Image (cartoon, grey):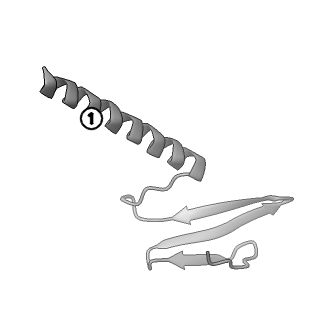
Amino acid sequence: MLALTRKKGESLVVDNNIEITVLEIRGDQVKIGITAPREVSIYRKEVYLQIQKENQAALNVDAITELKDLLQ
């Protein structure tokens, strides 16, 4: 993991086309802004993990259904 120090109003650039800017610092919370191309998906980590979990569950259900269909 790369750890960087940034102040309010400062940014960093990822992969030449994603800019992350520190918008506000209030206590232990930091508000960030992200500028990226529309085709780049951006999720909070807890949402991303939930999506991955649901996708995996859907794959498992599909695989079970396909196996049942093959056996019948």
Pick the front one: 46 or 21 = 46
Q: Pinpoint residue 70: horizontal percent, then vertical percent.
A: 13, 28
Q: In the displayed structure, does residue 43 sit left or right of residue 10? A: left
Residue topped by disc 1: 63
Pick the front one: 52 or 64 = 64
Pick the front one: 26 or 45 = 45
Badge 1, how many Cα within 10 Å: few under 14, some, many 20+? Answer: few
Say which element carries label 1. Answer: helix
Q: Pinpoint residue 7: horizontal percent, then vertical percent.
A: 76, 76
Q: Quadrant of the C terminus?
A: top left
Furthest-top residue in this view: 72
Furthest-right residue in this view: 27
- Which residue lies at the image location 15% right of the left edge and 24% below the top edge? 71
Where is residue 6, by image quadrant?
Answer: bottom right
- Which residue lies at the image location 36% right of the left edge and 59% below the top edge? 39
Where is residue 10, by image quadrant?
Answer: bottom right
Amino acid marked by disc 1: Ala
Residue 56 vs 26, above or below: the answer is above
